[in-house]
C-alpha cells in the first residue's frame, strides 16, 4: 500500500471520527457558545495537542502498553471520567447560580481580555488537553487506526507523526469552523435564560459521558 494512495481513506476516517459526538465536541460547543470563537480556540488547540501526543505515544509503542495494562487503563479511565464529571457538575452549578438572573433578553457580555486573560487561555488549553489525554479510548483508537495506513517498509514513528500532523490539521479546521458558526450565534446563547439551559444541557451531556467512560470496559 502506498502512503499517498491511502491518504483519501485516512482523511475520510478522520472526518467521520471528528464529527462523531463525544467529550471533545461537547467541550467545544459549550466553550464557543458561552465564550465565542476566540474563547474556543485554546480548547481546540489543547484537544489537538493531546491527540498528537497520543499519536506519538502510539508510534513509540507506549500507547499499546497503556492499553494492555489493566492498572494504567483503569487509572486513565478514572481520571478521564472524574474530569468530565467535574466539568459537568461545574456547568450544572453555573446553571443553578444563574436562576436568579432577570431579563430573558439581556445579553451576558463576553469580557474583554484582562490581566488574567493569559491564565484563562492556558486553563482552557489545559482542559482540552486533559480531556484528550485522560481518555483511554484514545490510546486504543491510535493503535487501531494508524497501523492500517503505514505502508510496509516505511519508518513507523516518522510516518505516524506525519499522519498525526494531517489529522491535527483536519480536526483543527473542522473544530474551529464549528466554533465560528456557534460563536456567531453567541448573542443568543449568552441570554441568561438560554445560557442557563445550555449550562444544564451541556452539564448533563458531560456527566453522562463521564459516567459512560467510568463504566465502559475495553
Image (cartoon, grey):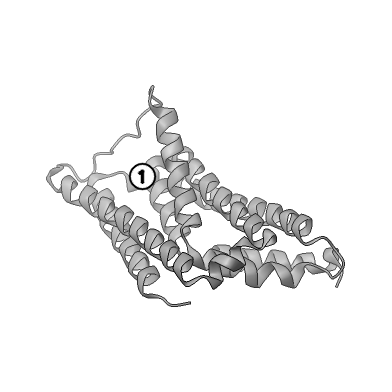
- Give residue 138's position: percent from left, percent from top: 54, 64
- Residue projecting furthest to the bottom: 217
Residue at far left of view? 100
Locate residue 155 relative to residue 53 in the image: left or right. right
Residue occupied by mark 1: 34
Give how far across and how far down residue 17 sits, in percent. 58, 67
Whether residue 93 sits left or right of residue 157 in the image: it is left
Q: Which corner quadrant holds the N terminus?
A: bottom right
Q: Is residue 42 visible?
A: yes
**In this view, 208 is above or below 100:** below
Q: Is residue 107 left or right of residue 68?
A: left
Q: Is residue 167 above or below residue 46?
A: below
Q: Position of residue 55 (x, y in %)?
A: 64, 58
Which residue is depicted at the point 47% across and 42% down? 125
Q: Quadrant of residue 108?
A: top left
Q: Is residue 34 left or right of residue 173?
A: left
Question: What's the residue at 45%, 51% (across, down)?
Answer: 130
When the figure is inspected, residue 199 is found, relative to residue 142, above or below; the finding is above
Callout 1 secondary element: helix
Q: Which is more toward the observer, 57 or 122? A: 57
Determine if residue 21 is in view: no
Number of other residues with Cα within 10 Å of mark 1, as a class: few under 14, some 14 to 19, many 20 or more: many
Q: Residue at x 77, y 62 (%)?
A: 156
Residue 119 in percent (x, y) is at 41, 31
Q: Residue 66 sits in which quadrant? A: bottom right
Please report the residue visible at 39 percent of the width from the left and 22 percent of the height from the top: 115
Front residue (pair 192, 206): 206
Q: How many marks?
A: 1
Amino acid at each position: 500500500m502506498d502512503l499517498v494512495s491511502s491518504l483519501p481513506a485516512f482523511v475520510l476516517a478522520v472526518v467521520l471520527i471528528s464529527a462523531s459526538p463525544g467529550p471533545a465536541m461537547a467541550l467545544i460547543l459549550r466553550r464557543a457558545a458561552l465564550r465565542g470563537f476566540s474563547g474556543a480556540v485554546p480548547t481546540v488547540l489543547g484537544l489537538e495537542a493531546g491527540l498528537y501526543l497520543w499519536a506519538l505515544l502510539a508510534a513509540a509503542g507506549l500507547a499499546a502498553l497503556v492499553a494492555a495494562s489493566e492498572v494504567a487503563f483503569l487509572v486513565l479511565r478514572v481520571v478521564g471520567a472524574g474530569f468530565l464529571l467535574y466539568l459537568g457538575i461545574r456547568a450544572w452549578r453555573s446553571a443553578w447560580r444563574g436562576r436568579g438572573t432577570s431579563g430573558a433578553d439581556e445579553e451576558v457580555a463576553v469580557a474583554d481580555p484582562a490581566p488574567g486573560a493569559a491564565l484563562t487561555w492556558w486553563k482552557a488549553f489545559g482542559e482540552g488537553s486533559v480531556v484528550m489525554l485522560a481518555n483511554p479510548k484514545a490510546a486504543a483508537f491510535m493503535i487501531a487506526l494508524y497501523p492500517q495506513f503505514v505502508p510496509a517498509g516505511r519508518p513507523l514513528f516518522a510516518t505516524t507523526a506525519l499522519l498525526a500532523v494531517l489529522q491535527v490539521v483536519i480536526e483543527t479546521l473542522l473544530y474551529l469552523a464549528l466554533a465560528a458558526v456557534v460563536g456567531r450565534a453567541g448573542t443568543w446563547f449568552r441570554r441568561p435564560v438560554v445560557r442557563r439551559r445550555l449550562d444544564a444541557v451541556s452539564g448533563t451531556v458531560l456527566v453522562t459521558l463521564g459516567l459512560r467512560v467510568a463504566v465502559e470496559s475495553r
